[in-house]
Image (cartoon, helix red, strand yellow):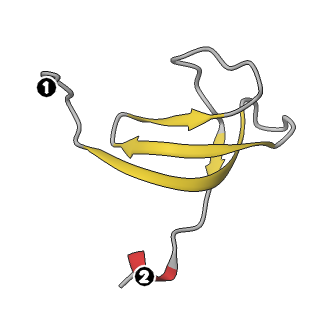
Amino acid sequence: MQDERRRHPRLVIRLPVEFRRKIFGEWKQGALRDLSGGGAAILTSDQVSPGTTLSHLRFTLPAEAVS
């Protein structure tokens, strides 16, 4: 078992996501793997270094997740 020492609780989630690194940059596609108040893990075929700041991130929660 891994010792979890994160500052923010993490929500494990699997959703399609779009993101861009610059305000007017090209939208890229990926898969959101987890999300927290301190960041997100995104799987993508694009080269993105860990810790990269994104200007925009957009995804849609499934209807059953919104109440």
In the picture as drawn, the residue positioned furthest to the front comes out as: 1
Judge the density around disc 1: few (<14), some (14-19), many (≥20) Cα neighbours within 10 Å.
Answer: few
Task: Pick whichever, 27 or 1, lies toward us.
Answer: 1
Disc 2 is placed on an element classified as helix
Circle 1 SS class:
loop
Around disc 2, counting alpha carbons within 10 Å, would you say few (fewer than 14), some (14 to 19), or many (20 or more)? few
Q: Quadrant of residue 48?
A: top right
At 20% from the left edge and 29% from the top edge, which residue is drawn?
Answer: 7
Counting the numbered discs, the total is 2
Find the distance from the CA under tag 1 to the CA under tag 2: 31 Å
* Amino acid identity at mark 1: Met
Residue, x 72% and y 30% (percent of image)?
21
Q: Position of residue 49 (x, y in %)?
A: 62, 14
Are the residues flagged by discs 1 and 2 in contact, CB closer than 8 Å?
Answer: no
Residue lying at 36% horizontally and 48% vertically, measured from the top left:
12
User: Which of 49 and 26 lies nearest the eye of the viewer?
Assistant: 49
Q: Can you tell which mark lies on residue 30? A: none
Q: In the drawing, what numbered circle is on residue 64?
A: 2
- Name the residue carrying label 1: 1
Kind of residue at badge 2 = Glu
Residue 16 to residue 39: above or below:
below
N-term mark: 1 or 2: 1
**In the displayed structure image, the side of residue 40 where residue 44 appears, left or right:** right
Which quadrant of the rendered structure holds the N terminus?
top left
Rendered view: 58 above or below 48: below
Q: How far across and how far down the image is residue 59, in percent?
A: 61, 59
Q: Residue at x 17, y 22 (%)?
A: 2
Residue 18's spot in the image, x, y percent?
71, 49
Question: Where 63 falls versus 29 (above or below)?
Answer: below
